[in-house]
């Protein structure tokens, strides 16, 4: 049997024709902000959209029709849909109506409300997932067995926590949070082990074999919420054992948005993607990890400084964001596709008359469909669906060097809150 390393190297040497995509603006028309976060192999898309009162609601799109699943949600004003499995179970995060007694702002919405992970399904509504006795929890991934990865607070007040608002707006964090797997039965929660010396962690992705990936660190050097960051990317085997995946020369920088070493997704072939700080902890790049190769730096698009691999399908195709200097705090992102050894600007693979400039790709399914968000000519941020134009590749699109648009302050704030995904 050919090894994964051989397949990767062979694909890199092929120099395949760039793919092309049809692009759909998921809207809705006139809405200032929406985001497509995940897509299954049957076309069910998850995400979020701005409601009439200005709050953000979890939504799903099916056959072009958007359904708001965030009202009543878990009782709070804001929610967001994340991933979806083959059985239509939607994973996400939502605020409750209860105030967080410690005002930790775990979700990053700035409301001071408690925040929980949820699973939603047509006809069954939204079900909150339990914590480890603490106030808050957040989602990671969901597999086709119905297991959910994420992280949950416990009741240990940790003196190592910074006790101040983090660079991404979450906090002040006071209690430890631990990587967990919920399910597959209702109400089940299992805490995962950490690397020696670490005290907190997050489980961000899980495959159908029960392997999970995420990050491990301490409360002093690990940031929750949007632009989550930690010092160690880790993999948990189905038996619970934890392994350090290494790094690209750096660890973490809690003073810079998203600057850390974390794994976001593992596919059923055991391939992992995420991002890792480079030496000096001033920049970070997306990576691909396999057992044969270890961690490979995928780089960023020409002229950019930082980036992250946010999702991957079973074929090892990776999507994410590549961000211009001097970093995500002021730089603009553009969506990328890494395929067969090449990183491509997704904006170069859609028609010239495309209705959006694509900022971040959050999801890719095994059919090659890609979802994320982009900016319209009017400056609104909308979710998108990019589908292969024909067959596996379609006709190549000539690179247009499309100019990055200038984002409004409102658009920039939305992008900063959700650049790595809603609530994480």
Image (cartoon, rainbow, N blue to C red):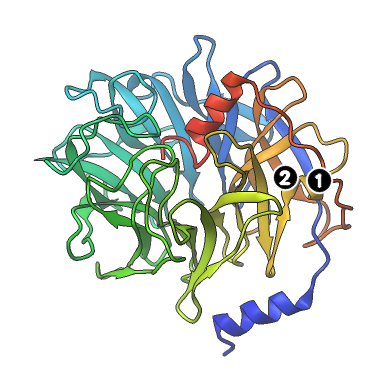
Crowd tier of the residue under label 2, counting other residues whose Cα lies within 10 Å: few below 14, some 14–19, many 20 or above:
many
Q: CA distance from mark 2 to mark 1?
A: 8 Å
Of tags 2 and 1, which is closer to the observer? 1
Crowd tier of the residue under label 1, counting other residues whose Cα lies within 10 Å: few below 14, some 14–19, many 20 or above:
many
Q: Residue at x 60, y 33 (%)?
A: 61
Q: Residue at x 69, y 41 (%)?
A: 385
Q: Quadrant of residue 90?
A: top left
Could you tell me residue 346's position as x and y percent?
Answer: 73, 49
For this view, does 94 lie left or right of residue 199? right
Q: Quadrant of residue 375?
A: top right
Instruction: Please say if 40 is above or below 164.
Output: below
Q: Which residue is mark 2?
A: 386
Q: Residue at x 42, y 66 (%)?
A: 247
Q: Secondary structure at mark 2?
A: strand
For this view, does 52 lie left or right of residue 381? left
Q: Which residue is mark 1?
A: 350
For this view, does 413 lie left or right of residue 16? left
Answer whether residue 237 is visible to the viewer in this image: no
Could you tell me residue 182's position as x and y percent?
Answer: 28, 49
Could you tell me residue 128's position as x and y percent?
Answer: 30, 34
Q: Nearer the viewer, residue 125 or 22?
A: 22
Marks 2 & 1, CB-CB < 8 Å contact: yes
Could you tell me residue 40's position as x and y percent?
Answer: 57, 49
């Amino acid at each position: 049997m050919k090894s994964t390393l051989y397949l990767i190297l062979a694909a890199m040497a092929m120099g395949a024709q760039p793919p092309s995509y049809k692009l759909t603006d998921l809207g809705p028309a006139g809405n200032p902000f929406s985001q497509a976060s995940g897509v299954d192999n049957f076309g069910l898309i998850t995400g979020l959209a701005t409601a009439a009162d200005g709050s953000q609601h979890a939504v799903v799109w099916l056959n072009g029709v958007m359904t708001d699943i965030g009202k009543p949600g878990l009782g709070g004003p804001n929610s967001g849909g994340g991933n979806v499995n083959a059985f239509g179970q939607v994973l996400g995060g939502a605020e409750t109506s209860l105030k967080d007694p410690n005002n930790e702002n775990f979700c990053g919405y700035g409301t001071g409300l408690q925040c929980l992970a949820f699973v939603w399904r047509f006809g069954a509504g939204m079900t909150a997932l339990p914590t480890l006795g603490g106030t808050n929890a957040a989602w990671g991934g969901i597999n086709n067995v119905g297991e959910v990865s994420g992280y949950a607070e416990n009741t240990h007040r940790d003196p190592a926590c910074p006790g101040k608002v983090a660079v991404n707006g979450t906090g002040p964090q006071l209690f430890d949070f631990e990587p967990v797997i919920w399910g597959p039965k209702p109400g089940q929660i299992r805490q995962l082990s950490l690397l020696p010396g670490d005290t907190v962690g997050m489980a961000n992705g899980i495959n159908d074999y029960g392997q999970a990936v995420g990050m491990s660190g301490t409360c002093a050097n690990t940031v929750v919420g949007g632009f989550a960051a930690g010092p160690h990317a880790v993999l948990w085997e189905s038996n619970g054992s934890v392994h350090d995946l290494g790094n690209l020369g750096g660890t973490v920088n809690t003073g810079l948005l998203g600057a850390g070493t974390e794994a976001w997704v593992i596919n059923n072939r055991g391939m992992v993607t995420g991002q890792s700080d480079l030496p000096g902890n001033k920049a970070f790049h997306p990576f691909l990890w396999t057992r044969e190769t270890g961690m490979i730096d995928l780089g960023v698009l020409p002229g950019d400084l930082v980036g992250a691999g946010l999702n991957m399908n079973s074929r090892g195709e990776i999507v994410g964001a590549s961000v211009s200097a001097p970093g995500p705090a002021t730089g603009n992102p553009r969506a990328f596709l890494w395929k067969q050894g090449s990183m491509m600007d997704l904006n170069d693979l859609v028609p010239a008359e495309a209705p959006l400039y694509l900022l971040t790709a959050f999801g890719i399914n095994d059919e090659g469909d890609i979802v994320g968000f982009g900016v319209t000519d009017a400056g609104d941020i909308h979710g998108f669906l990019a589908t292969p134009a024909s067959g596996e590749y379609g006709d190549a699109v000539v690179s247009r060097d499309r100019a990055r648009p200038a984002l409004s302050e409102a658009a920039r704030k939305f992008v900063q809150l959700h650049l790595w995904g809603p609530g994480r």
